[in-house]
Image (tube, rainbow, N blue to C red):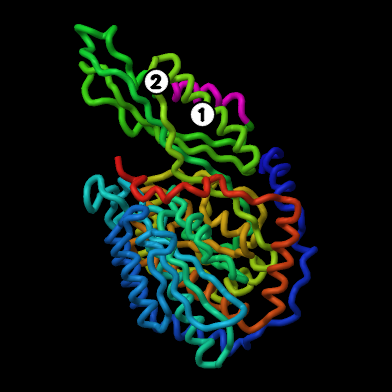
Amino acid sequence: MKRFNAIILAALTPILVAAVPRPTGSGIEAKDRRQLIDRMDGQSAHFGDLSKKIWEFAEVGYKEKQSAALLKSELQSAGFQIQENVAGIETAFTAVWGRGKPVIGIMGEFDALPGLSQDTIPERKPRIAGAPGHACGHNLFGVASAFAAIAAKGFAEERKISGTIRFYGTPAEEGGDGKVYMARAGVFSDCDIVLHWHPGDKNQADLRTCNAVISAKFRFYGQASHAASAPEKGRSAVDAAMLMGHAVDMLREHVESSTRMHYIITNGGAAPNIVPDFAEIFLYARHPSMASLDGIWKRIVKCAEAGALATETRMEMELIGSSYNVLPNDALTTLIDRNLRIVGGIKYTPEEQAFAETLRKTFSTDNAPDLGSQEQIFAPQEGLESGSTDAGDISWLAPTGWLNTATYVPGTPGHSWQAAACTGGSIGRKGMMVAAKTLALTAVDLLTDPAEVQAARASFDKRRAGHEYRSRIPPEHKPPLNYRDK
């Protein structure tokens, strides 16, 4: 890791794992773990089918009506009580079983990414040209988390274990920040522990932080005119957008090296012979520290204002979202790692091996995990994950633990057609089962061993001590339900 990132992480995560007191024993015996795993294995085909259906739905953020409905139906059939329309969002929901403490939350996502439709073959072939696709594996994410909640509930119910299991159906993780609005509605306020996972290319309990992010759409309004016969009467909104983009590109040299700024022009005019009176840029900015990002964001806004000033156009900014860096939890990471090692890695069939070998020829494997590493369990490591997630905000509100599993062929880049090919096939479903079983075992440990919950809380309190949490989304700001619309 670069020295600068190490300094940032040292400030964000000052407490070492060794400083957190560990419980002396687990609440369930080895034979009970084996029984839970075997029972889940017997249900793997059913939940694999659910993940394939959501993969086929491929619905983008806040539009995941079929995906949410499928998960709600499954959880309701398993005996969970459903609360719909959380925070005024049609696809946000909770599913609750049990009563009393501890309250163990498990988060599940189900939104797809635009433009990444892909068949389950190791060559580029969209199922539907231009359509969304599950290139981040959220079809697996939501189903595995729901399966874990159902399995843990069945175990607790049979043994008359007290406590509450709450599944969170969290929409629009990909830039829509559904969890932030759900948290604002108070549904995480009584949670003792929150668990989640994410698809990836290796099996590892995660102790990393990630980048905080702020995103917005910058809209420029000018004056239309004939571009040939009366150009002097026009005021080009596209010129303003291009000047903003150029200013942002020049700004890259003058911000901390860990900063990420990326944008697209979502509207660039209607025809070359018309001076465009409207243009729009959609921009993300990221940094490991939200406090540092605040200053960078102010400079980005000035770039937009400068573009408008120079072209005599008008600029409006619509904040789309903002999420915090993840606050790691040492105790939960240790517990998840222990259960992940019990579950184990992923074996490929000869057909899956051939698929993996062919797929790896379509992308660079420099610095990538070796093919075969999906069978291993990697030790947790502190570090910086360059992406962002609205789960970061939840990790500042309650002790939160997570893991990654090898749902992709090792080395596969996220947000790619290759990832979408994996998440719709058997390789993705095998990784999903590793996550589901690990989360279920961890939830049962937390329900049966108060010392595990106490250790997680102690880690949370020490990590967060001296740091402020304040969402950068204003209290009056409503969920951007149409943020994926062009």
Residue 244 colored in magenta in the image: yes
Depicted 51 relative to depicted 59: above or below: below
Can residue 353 be seen by looking at this rendering?
Answer: no
Q: Name the kind of residue labelled 1 in the image.
A: Val
Residue 286 percent coordinates (x, y): 55, 40
Q: Residue furthest bottom?
A: 159
Quarter of the figure that contains the N terminus: top right
Depicted 87 relative to depicted 480: above or below: below
The answer to whether residue 20 is left or right of residue 257 is right
Query: Which residue is rendered at x = 33% and y = 34% of the image?
Result: 266
The earlier-in-sequence mark between 2 and 1 is 2
Main SS of the magenta part reads helix
Residue 433 percent coordinates (x, y): 45, 72
Residue annotated with mark 1: 301
**Camera-side residue of 245 and 372:** 245
Residue range corresponding to the magenta coloring:
242-255
Residue annotated with mark 2: 240
The answer to whether residue 276 is left or right of residue 160 is left
SS at circle 2: helix
